[in-house]
Image (cartoon, helix red, strand yellow):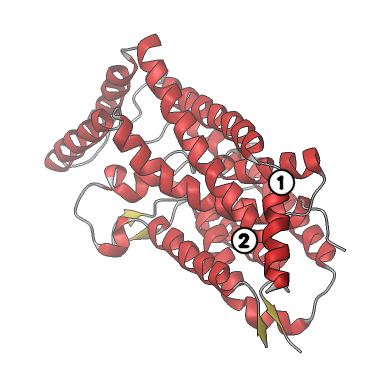
Amino acid sequence: MDEVAEQQAEQNNQPPYWTSVGIAGLIFGIIVFALSLVTSYAMINSEPTGSLFSPVQLLGVFVCLVGAFGGMLAIWHYANEYDISIKLGKGALIGLFTGICIALVTVVFNQIWQFIDPDMTQKLIDSTIANFEASELPDDTKQQMIDSTVQSMRDQNSIGTQLLYNLPMYGILNVLTGMIGAKVFGKKEG
Amino acid sequence: MQIRQPILYASILLLVFVVVLVAMGGGLFNQSTPWPVQWQHQSFNSLCHQIADRSFWISGQPMAVCSRCIGIYSGFALGWVLLPMLSLMKITRVAYIKKIVVFVLLFNLIDAAGNFFGLWQNTLVSRTVLGGMLGSSTALIFIGDFFQHN
């Protein structure tokens, strides 16, 4: 019982991790937002090829999963700042909060960008339609794809939809990287 | 065998399987909506390039992530499931595993770069295998954290 109380007290005495969560969330939120912006404008400015993906997206092979590493950065910052050991559970928790933060930052920047370039979504939709039109799909399939994709792109402008899609995956993946971070960067006890 | 932090282990096991199922895309469930707008694709939209040509297909629909990413997720899931058995190996020097992870990560980057610059052509299978090696070796970092054999 005393041991449990001691551990509880030790946990309570640990410094807050919100600064680390905020910094990592902001940095990775901006990176994810910037990458999505680059991809969007590359698609808008490319000639319709009939392919659903532009060659520029091949660059994405280097940035796969980049948004999942916020948890690791948060742990690295937290461990460096306070030079303390971090338990796996705490690493997971910090990762979860960082994932949520990344999703929120991305949504906020997306909303801000709507004011900076209000026509971006429409240009993206036009580009997507042009791409579908150039594809060799059967006409009825083509029309069905166009309708549902356009509807989906319009829906994605809403804050609720963006959070619904982004929060769970960023949360889960950053939980994992948070734990990995705790294992890699946390000071060993004893 | 002594189990430590069973709730954390089970929670991660569950979450990882959810991620793998979602990553496999709508084809797994024979969804009728066009795949670019399926919720699985939307969920991984900003986490993976999702290029259909570089993804496995199920029931005429590409997975929600590329072949390398599905390798990473499923490799991690496999490694996580095998943790109790792998703990028998009594590997105490986690530093070795960390070096292996870094090596496999570099190997993946070199593979992606070589393919991008046209030095060689990797395949769906080669990308999945390399991703799987990365995922499973990452899971092995946690050897000894959840299971201990007396």
The answer as to whether the residues below labels 2 and 1 share one chain is yes
Question: Dot 2, crowdedness within 10 Å: few (<14), some or many (≥20)?
Answer: many
- Tag 2, which secondary structure? helix
Q: Is A4 above or below relative to B69?
A: below
Q: Is B148 above or below relative to B107?
A: below
Residues at marks 2 and 1 touching, judged by CB atoms closer than 8 Å: no
The residue that mark 2 highlights is B135
Going by the image, does A31 lie left or right of B113? Answer: left
Residue type pointed to by label 1: Ile
| Extreme-top residue of the structure | A116
Where residue B106 appears, as percent x and y from the top left, is: 74, 49
Where residue A9 appears, as percent x and y from the top left, is: 70, 57
Residue B22 falls in which quadrant of the image? bottom left
Disc number lying in front (2 or 1): 2
Q: Upstream in the sequence, badge 2 or badge 1?
A: 1
Going by the image, does A141 lie left or right of A14? Answer: left
Q: Is A53 above or below relative to B74?
A: above
Chain of the residue under label 1:
B
* Image quadrant containing the N terminus of chain B: bottom right
- Tag 1, which secondary structure? helix
The residue that mark 1 highlights is B110
| Number of numbered labels in the structure image | 2
The answer to whether residue A102 is seen in the rendering is: yes
| Extreme-left residue of the structure | A140
3D distance between C-alphas at marks 2 and 1? 17 Å
Residue drawn at point x = 73 percent, y = 39 percent: A77
Residue drawn at point x = 71 percent, y = 46 percent: B110
Where residue B51 appears, as percent x and y from the top left, is: 44, 43
Where residue A82 appears, as percent x and y from the top left, is: 79, 42
Question: Dot 1, crowdedness within 10 Å: few (<14), some or many (≥20)?
Answer: few
| Extreme-front residue of the structure | A2
